[in-house]
Each structure stands twice: as C-alpha cells, then as structure tokens.
Amino acid sequence: MQKKFNSDRYDPLSTERDSLSRRHFIKGVIAAGTVAGAAGLMTGCSDNSNNSASSASVERLVTINVNGRSRPVDVMPNETLAHTLRNKLSLTGTKIGCDRGACGACTVMIDGVTQNSCSILTHTVRKGNVVTVEGVGGVNGQLHPVQTAMIEELAPQCGFCTPGQVVSGVALLQRNPNPTREEVRQALAGNLCRCGAYNNYINAIVNAAGSA
Amino acid sequence: MAYKLIGKDFTPQDVRPKVTGAGKYTEDFKVDGMVYMKMLLCPMPSANVTSFDATDALDMPGVFGVLTADEVPQVEEPGFPMLTNKPRQLGMPIAAIAAETESIAAEALEKIKVTFDPQPFVLDPLESLYPGGTNALDGGNVTGGNIQGKEGVGGNKIHDFKWTARDFAIAGDEKMPMGEAPVEWAVGDVEAAFAEAALIIDEPFVTASSSHAALEPRSVLSYWENGKCFIHGSSQSQSWMMPGLARMMNISLEDIVYVAEYCGGGFGSKASPYPVQGMTAYMSKKIGRPVMLRVTRAEEYHFGGQRPGFQGQVKMGFDKQGKMTACDLYIVQSGGPNRGSGDYSSAAGAVALVYTPTNMRFRGAAVVTNKPWHVSQRGPGQNQIACVIEPLLDKAAKELGIDRIAIRNLNAPEADVKFTNRNSTVTSMFLKDAFSLGADLFKWEEKKKMSGQRNGSKVIGVGVGTAYHSAGSNGFDGLLSIRPDGKLYVHSGVGNLGTYSYAGTSRAAAEVLQCSWDNTVVLRGDSRQGLPWTLAQFGSNSSYTNTRTNFVAATKMKKMLQRLAAQELGDAPEDYDVANESVFHTSDETKIMTFAEAASKAIELGGEWDGHEYPDDLNDVTKSAMKKVVGAGLVSAAKDKIPKEGSVPGMATGYCMIELDTETGKFEILEYHSVADCGTVLHPKGLEQQLRGGAVMGIGEAVLDRVIYDPQNGLCATVGLDQTKPPSILDVPSNMEMSAVDKPDLSNPLGVKGIGEPAMGCAAAALLCAISDATGIYFNRTPVDPDMIINALSGRPQSFKPLQVNT
C-alpha cells in the first residue's frame, strides 16, 4: 500500500505517487484473482449487492476498523474502500469525484495517513484503522476544530470536495499541530476544489490549528 | 439604509452538513429495490447504428431491462437526444441496461451486439465552413442567425452554411477568413473610424473549449410512486427544472417530484434538465424499479458539457488618447452536435459595454461539430472575450504610452451607457469606482514599477483585468408562509450551487418583516416543500432576481399581517407594524399578534389568508407549489412586478502580479486582488467566496483548462481531471484579497446585483495581462501554457497555426 505522500512535503515533481499507487491498485485486483473484477474496474463500476453473476467474484466476510468500530462486511475481491464505505457501511460522507485517485473527494485516513479510498482495495485494509469524515469529530457528534473553523470561514461552496478537505486537514494537524499556510497548502494538494475555495480551506485549517 | 441582515455574515443551514459529510448528494440516496443503470455510448465521433441486438444481455441473470432510442422521445436536430441511433458525437448514449449491480450492467453492455456505420465527422468549425466541408449534423452545420434570401433559415434551427474558397485564400493561415456571417450587427461606421485611428490592432485569436469539470458527476436516481415521477438530480437549479422534466417525461407538473438539496458544482453545465435524467426515469418506468445512474468522470467529459471555444479576428482602432473608436469583431463559435449557447453574441455585447467603442461591428457564426455538447460555462462569452481583448488593450496602451488602468478607465462605461445595435442600457454602473478602489488596494503605481524586474531567470509581470456579466433578472415569484410555530418560512426555488444565494436572498424577506434569522426557515431542495417559480441558478442572477421576489412577497406579507391585525384587534392596518415575529399596534401595546397567532388565525379564516386564494399571474410552477402550502399558515405569494429597465451589470476587476521563469515558462502568482461592482453587498463572506473561487477558475481558463480531440479519429484525449487540469491548490496563491465598491443598484429594492461570473473573467484576463507584461508577448490564445511561453521567448515558432484548434 502506498502512502498518499511520501513525506509531509509533497513533491510536485515526483511522478511516483500516481503511477505507483495505480500500479499497486491494479496488481491488487489481479492478485485477488478475478477477471470480471478487472472488467468492472475498467468500466468504473463496483458491486453493491450480495450476489453477483460473476462466478469468480466471490465475496468474503472481512472485518475492518472504521471510525473506531469493528465493522464486519462482505466484500468483493475487487471492491474499493470508497465503495465499501459508501454502499455497505452507509458512510456516504466519503465522495467519489473521479474514482481514479485524481480528485481527493474520497480521502480517508488509514492509520493516520491520507489515502484516496477509491484507489484502495477494501481487503487490503483489514489490519488498518480507517477514519472517514464521519469519524473525525467527537463520539457525541461534536465537530472537530477543523470542521468548526470551516463553518466559521464559510469554507465549502458546493461541498462535494469538503469531506476530503476536512480529512486532509485533520490528518495534517495530527502530525503537525501548527502548520504554516504553505504547509497546509501542500497537505491539501491532493484535494481538488472546482469551486476554488482553496484560500478558505487554508484559512480554516490555520485557524483550527490555533484552537485544536 | 441600516439593515439588520443585508450585508451581514451568517451561517447558512447547509454548511454544517457539508463539513460533516451528512449532506446528501444524489448518489448518497438509497431506495428499496434500487437497481443500477449503465449506458452504451457511441465509441466514435459520428455513426449510424445499423443493428442492435440485446438478447444475450437480457438473458443474463440480474439484468432487468434494456432501454433503446425507440422507447424515449426523440428530438429534432440540433436537439440533444436522450438515446439515439444516429449518435453524432463520441460518447453519445445509444442504449442503457439496468441490472442488479453495476458490474452486471457493465457485463451485459458488452453482450449487446451492435454495429455502426461510421459517418464523416468534423472537429474544427473552420473546416466545416470550407466549401464542401463536413457538416456535423444531417441538417447542416450552423445554428442561429438569419441569412437573407435562404429558405428555412433562422431561429434556432440548423442550416447548411459555407464560406467561399476565396474567403479562405484571402485570409491565408495567419488571419481569420471572414466570409458572410449568419449573425451580424453594426453601430456607426467602423471602416471610417479605422481610417482616422491613431493606432490599429488587428489580431486573430483562439480560446479553447474547456470542461466544466464539476466535482460531482451528474448522477440520477429516479423512481415512480403512485403515478408520480421522483427524480433526484445534481442541478444548479430547483424550480427551473420542473417544466422541462415534466415535458421530458410527458407528464404534468403535479406529477414531478424533484429533489436536489445539494449539487456538487455545475458552473453552467447543470442549469437545466439534462437527458440522462429523463433516460433514468424512463428506465425506472419501464422496469418498475428505482434506478440509479452513477455517471463516471469519463462519461462526464462526454456529456457533461464544455465551454464553446472561439476562433476569431478582432480589429480595434484607437485615438491618441486611447479611446477605442472602432471595434470589428468576428467570432466563430465551436459547438457540439446540438444547439449551443449564445456565447459569441454575449461576447460582442460585453465588448460593446466594457470598452464602449464608438463604432462597432460584430459578425459571428455558431458552428456545430462532432465534439460533445457545448453549453454555457461561467461567464459564457464574456469571459472568453475578456481573455482576448484585455491583453490587446494592454498592447494598445503600451504603443500609445498610456497607463493600463487609465486606458480601461477612459473606455469604461458610465451609468447612461447605450451599447450594441439594440441601444441596451444598464441599471447601474460603478466600474470606474472599481478601478479606482482596485488601484489603491493593489497599490497599482508601486506594483507597476516592479514590472519587468529581473531576479536571475525570473521576471515580474503585473496585470489588470475586467469582466462583465448581465447579473440579474425579474418577473419571477416569491412565496412565504408564517406557520403556527411562529416562524417565517421562505420557500426558495433557487438551486444550491454552493453560492449560498438561496440563503442570502431569503434574508431579504426576513429583513422586510424584521424577523430574526434564527426564526427564519428556508425551505428548498425538494419540490414537495412547495417551491415557487424562479430562474435557474445561472447567469449570476440569483442574488438580484430573488432578493426582488422575496422582497415582493414579504412586502405583501407585511400588509397581510397589518390587515389581519386590524381586522382582529381593531383600528386601521396603517396603525400596525411588523417586527420581532409579531404584528403590533404602534400606539397601543395591548394590541399585538404574534406570528404564531397570526398563522393560526389565517388557517382558521382560510381563503386569501392561508393560500387557498392566490394571484392569477403566478407561474404554473408556483400555482402547483400553492397546493402543497395551502393551509400551512399565513401564506403570501406574489409575482415580482417591480420595474426594471436594462441589463443588470455585474462588473469585476482583477489585479495580479506574477513572477515568471523565462527558462521554464512557469510562473507563480505572487498576489491577486479583486474588486467588484455588485451593488450593495448582500453577504460579505459569500461575495468573498465568489470572487476567490472565480479567480481560481479564471486562472484555470487562462493557463490550464482545455479539452483536446485527436483530429484523425475524433477521440477525446482529455477524459480525466489530471488531463483537463482544473487548478489545484498549488496553482493559485494562498491568499487572495477581495473588495467591493458596495454602491446600490437602485433597480433592486435592496441594491443588490450578482457577481459570480465576472469574478472569473477578470482574473483570467488579469493573469494573461501579467504574462504578457512579463514576456512582452501577446499570445491571442487560451490557455497559455509554458511551452507557448518558452517558444515565444526563444523566438521559436509555436507548434500550431494562429487559428488552429485542439492544440
């Protein structure tokens, strides 16, 4: 499994991240031994029910830790984490904008590291702790300071990229409680926002760092 | 006027669900028995389907049905078909399969036996205008306009239109061929003005098509319950969708339920009903199951809309002082295989208004091609032409020795401007104030001195940009209810594009009724709430249009409260005022009715009070909404009949400083400042968002965003976000400054105008001007990429000819 960033500082000149993670992702699918799964991958779809016509695509019960809870779930070998979260665990805060690891709307944390959940196979995270946007706040629905600051800053516009921005911001503050604006910028580099609310997201995360 | 709510920041109700992930976008809904649909798309740019056999697909376990072109309404050229056997673009839907899972549907698609007869195709509008050139559609190649003496031409129909070989021969490769134009207008005499001009600038230009690339694809969920058709969609608009969807499904307005509480971006591409919405609903009707269509990113590039590209020539004459005395503009607009938008005409209107040329001629042709659906994108026409004209205005300023803001100021309109052949007027104009404020805030004089400063291979460039959009409309309906819970309910038919204008404009009603925002509820996002008719959330219009509708409905509501109190408590309606969620006697404090009491009384009285009776001039959509609101409390519905003369000009100016590396052609934007003339500021944080977000998208338009097609096979080379390159956070400055002139437009009761679109165009223009300032080169093309900069700086020819597209 590839980390989204090799270090805190994203190197924009490196091609390593996209090419490697994509290659690993496809290798993961092939290792799972399903031709039909690969076809599904290429057409950009994923299964959402418990029985499939594809004989090779046998589901297996796995348990993954999501937002601090053990969640047993039947997954297909070729199933992405984004689909498991959204369609089987009803955690629809994680959005799918491209399904190709290009936009970051599906960003989640796995063991504290941000990942594009559309490009991670669920069966590969059985040993990891997954945190989604639904899990960054307190147990009783309290918001994380990053979320509070985003509300105060009126950071989101259409809001579709926002869960990913929240998760990237929370992950940053976990490893760097007092980031500079430039460090926030680098940490959000994998999260596209077509509305262009970038400045507001930076403001919010810097403000949250002060109050976190 | 001292407002309690207008001009103040607040937290719209949908912000929290956006940051928690609880906000439900179309794909987040699940309905019992829901199945998934996938589409068979045309794999080539133009073809006729010669055979189609889905037998094997239908035999697969888990497949529920196939939907073909024969089962859905067909449209005439140049309409956008839902499903077709004559696909005229790559990725046009031919058929759809519904199955238990998406994988089954995808496998089933592969089992459909379909054969195609490939047809000639055209991607470059100029090729289509060449004698004998390919027409993208059977009926012709040009939409819009009137050619005298040719039968059956005009309006929005398609016609066959060619220039002569001589037109092309005269022009050569370096200049736009300028044959007869389907659309033409003139003011004054440009030729005479050119003869007397101190300076003439005459340049060809190209602006690339680009994808809207909204982050949420246009997914659809549809199901039928008790004869009603439910559609969950990703749309900019709410009430605007209703009539089109009803027509698409051939059912009455009453039978459409439209849910669009959240929309993950549209930028013009999700303004009106789109064919996949109908397709999903027809499939659901056919198989009797709820159907979810998850549109993929690649599909979004095929039918999600693109900004029309321009090829053109602009000739401008200036006097010694820098006044633009003549402008001769010719634009050929690239469209998809369907009726496009009026970008080229809007571009001409923008030139006429922003630079007020004394004499002007506009000629234009909207040419259809076998590229995807082209549709309005943020600042349709105005923003492309800002990218063309603004750098050339700098070129003129340089040659005439005039300051670049000064030349813009000199040519800027006043409030009494008359522009285009229609002698159009404006409702207000404070562009000069914006330049003056912008120059101060950006410290233009200081920054200008830094222009050209070198640091190793890096050089400083400074630019200013201007953009306009007609930013407001009128004649729509407002609907309010005061309910027994004592709260004011604003029924908003505005969509949720992410601008929060649905909320900002609702505050107009609360302001008039002096109701606290805490006790104001905005109903929206689901037609079952009873939502009034209003314009789509496009064209920067919502702030202006819906402050008016809500003002009108609230003014009526206030009178109703006064009459009701007088009727129940005695004395005349004028003796009562409204505030603090109550109607009270101004000189007898015992005579008071709370909103809750008024609502209960209204329900008791019925008739005109609780929505049983309403004005006949309301739109059918509002009348349909009344049926859902009736009896809810005290109900006020009214049509906006406040006078409005002229266009409502949203004006924006941008100021930009860059450091450009002459060895790599890359640059960093060091500073960006934007100053808007958007009337009275309605919602400061919302305005900031629009100016900043517009700037980001403008940076994309100037230097990044484009779509490219392979000229040999007509296939799309840009089907991913990594390929069309919408700006990332690293492409834009981390702090952009925003300000507004904040002077009221008196045609709006609260002084408000829109701004979303010019916010983008001014940034695109300012950046291009800064690049030209740093390099001394005028590219006459967007986007400007580092290769072009390097080629130009090193004296190498560009890799394309001046009017070439798909570069």
Image: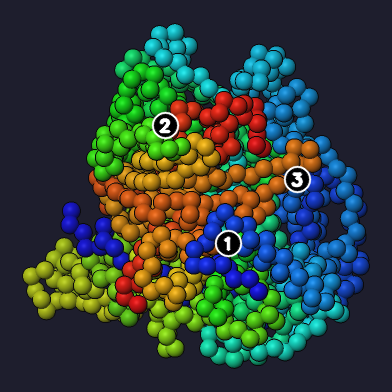
For label 2, the residue is B773
- Above or below, A197 relative to B576: above
Alpha-carbon neighbours of circle 1 within 10 Å: few (<14), some, or many (≥20)? many
Name the chain letter of the residue that bears numbered label 2.
B
N-term mark: 2 or 3: 3
Residue B204 at x, y percent in the picture:
56, 24
Residue B728 lies, with reference to residue B444, above or below; the image says below
Residue at point 66%, 20% (across, down): B173
Q: Residue at point 74% right, 68% down?
A: A26
* Image quadrant assignment for residue B2: bottom left
Displayed quadrant of residue B767: top left
Callout 1–callout 3 Cβ contact below 8 Å: no
Q: CA distance from mark 2 to mark 3?
A: 37 Å
What amino acid is labelled 3 in the image?
Leu
Q: Are marks 2 and 3 in contact (CB under 8 Å)?
A: no
Residue at position x 43%, y 81% in the image:
A137
**Image vertical order of residue B711 relative to residue A45, above or below:** above
The answer to which of B684 and B711 lies nearer the viewer is B711
Classify mark 3: helix, strand or loop: loop
- Specify whether B781 is left or right of A47: left
Instruction: Where is residue B517? Give x, y as percent.
Output: 29, 70
Q: Return the mark for residue A103.
A: 1
The image shows residue B713 at horizontal and vertical percentages of: 79, 41
Callout 3: residue from which chain? B
Check disc 1 and report its element: helix, strand or loop: loop
At label 2, which amino acid type do we have?
Asp
Quadrant of the image containing the C terminus of chain B: top right
Q: Are marks 2 and 1 on the same chain?
A: no
Q: Label 3, on which residue?
A: B715
Colouring: rainbow
